[in-house]
Amino acid sequence: MKRQKLPQKTEPRTKFPKKITESEAQKKKQQGTEPKKRKRRRAGTGSGKQSQATPYDDVFRTLLNDCTPMILPIVNEMFGTDYTGDEAVEFHPNQHFINQQNGKEEKRITDSSFTVISTVPKHYLLELQSSPDSSMLVRIFEYSTQIALDSGELTNNTLHVTIPNCGILFLRSTRNTPERMQIELETPGGSTAFYVQVLKTQKYTIQ
């Protein structure tokens, strides 16, 4: 009786890409068949706050929209105003599109932009900051100038823009955190500046 041989198991061979000569690679390149190389994304090249909102920002916007009367005491403390709390508060869109030098538009999201309707209506821009940030003033300048452009008026070949009252609410601060910040502008007609008020929550208690 003949023994029957069991079929041998063979593992599939791994196919390696076929090597091509330099002349063949040059020919494919001329024909436009060269495979595209994947571009590596460098770390740290993404946009800042305009594309990422922190939980603090979301809570701050929710509080201001759902508990609008709470904003007036903050404005009084920050800007030295004397609103009674009966004034109407009109909120403005918090999304703005800023034109970049490369021709592209970049979306920026402000924390809170609103007007207090009083005898003299005033426009405010409040930003919440969890800790001191060296780029905060740059963002305030971008936000405020874009808001000014959005509400600007062109009359008799003159563009009139109004910078809103700007303030930063710091959740955390150090002894180096200033009491007030400033943005200076040098123009052909002379220099000008506007202040950015600062409010530090660590200086206050629940009472």
Image (cartoon, grey):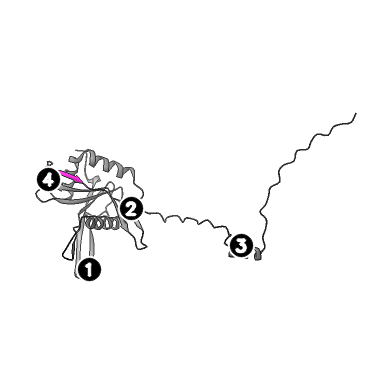
Kindly check if marks 4 and 2 are in contact, taking CB atoms under 8 A apart as contact: no
Label 4 SS: loop
Q: Distance between the residues labelled 2 and 1?
A: 27 Å
Task: Indicate yes or no whether the magenta region holds residue 89.
Answer: yes
Tell me the quarter of the picture where residue 161 sits: bottom left
What residue type is disc 3 on? Lys
Q: Is tag 3's residue or tag 4's residue first in the polypeptide sequence?
A: 3
Q: What residue would you read off at disc 3?
A: 28
Q: Neighbour class for label 2 at 10 Å: few (<14), some, many (≥20)?
A: few
Q: Distance between the residues labelled 4 and 2?
A: 33 Å
For this orientation, the residue located farthest to the left is 119
Q: Which of 31 and 145 is in front in this view?
A: 31
Q: Which of pointers 2 and 1 lies earlier in the amino acid sequence?
A: 2
Residue matched to label 2: 107
Q: Distance between the Cα atoms at labels 2 and 3?
A: 41 Å
Q: Give the range drawn in magenta.
A: 88-92
Which numbered mark, 4 or 2, is in the foreground of this view? 2
Which quarter of the image is occupied by the C terminus?
A: top left
Percent of width and height locating residue 96? 29, 52
Give the number of the mark in front: 3 or 4.
3
Q: Is residue 23 left or right of residue 184?
A: right
Of label 2 and label 3, which has the lower sequence position? 3
Which quadrant, please, contains the N terminus?
top right
Q: How far apart are marks 4 and 1 (CA)?
A: 34 Å
Name the residue that disc number 1 marks.
Answer: 187
How many other residues sit within 10 Å of disc 3, few (<14), some (14-19) or many (≥20)?
Answer: few
- For the image shown, how many numbered marks are present on the structure? 4
The residue furthest top is 1
Percent x, y of residue 106: 34, 55
